[in-house]
Image (cartoon, helix red, strand yellow):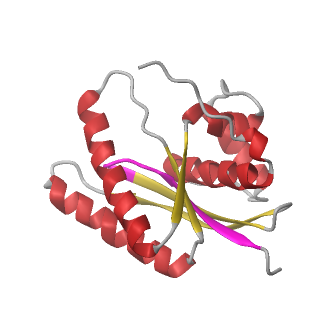
Amino acid sequence: MANKIRVLGIDPGLASVGWGVVETDGARLFYRGHGCIATKAGTDVALRLGMIRDALTTIIAEHEPAELAMESLFFSRNVTSALGVAEARGIIRLVCLDAGLSMREYGPMEIKRAASGSGGSGKSEVQSFVRIVLGLSEIPKPDHAADALAVAICHCQSRTFPSLAKPEHRRI
């Protein structure tokens, strides 16, 4: 179909960037690929960010998405971890900009709500949903890749049903 849109979903992180590619024709979802960009702790942060940039550039060239969807930054206690994730998100944004992709962010509750109807769903419920909706024989591994596919699915659903994409209320 001429109206298919390919979406790259991203679960950002410094140690692991999950990615998943889903295509939609507005009514159906089609699985196109998934994986994880892993960087090793103890490696210089600049090198790790460069590895993320290079790998993501290759993934975009291979899968040719039209849009990118990313999970928004969420942290509760570990500020050090959040800083690394924020730096990785900056690199992801620049790669997205360089590739000419439009980008949208979704909060964890929004993604869970799109996956199961409830923002309080557990990780296993979301991963089972991803497996079923995409017609996969098993839950995608690693977890970060399954999460990225959930982000892509959430974006596809919000394109088809804009009222599902309700902004989350966050306390600051």
Q: Is residue 124 visible?
A: no
Residue at 75% from the left image edge and 35% from the top image edge: 116
* Magenta-drawn segment: 4-16
Q: How many marks?
A: 0
- Residue 54 x/y as whole percent: 32, 72
Q: Nearer the viewer, residue 74 or 100?
A: 100
> Residue 51, located in which quarter of the rendered image?
bottom left
Residue 22 lies in the magenta stretch: no
- Residue 161 x/y as whole percent: 80, 48
Predominant SS along the magenta part: strand
In the depicted structure, whether residue 42 falls above or below residue 103: above
In the depicted structure, whether residue 67 falls above or below residue 131: below
- Residue 40 x/y as whole percent: 25, 54
Residue at 51% from the left image edge and 59% from the top image edge: 19
Q: Nearer the viewer, residue 68 or 22?
A: 68
Residue at 70% from the left image edge and 70% from the top image edge: 5
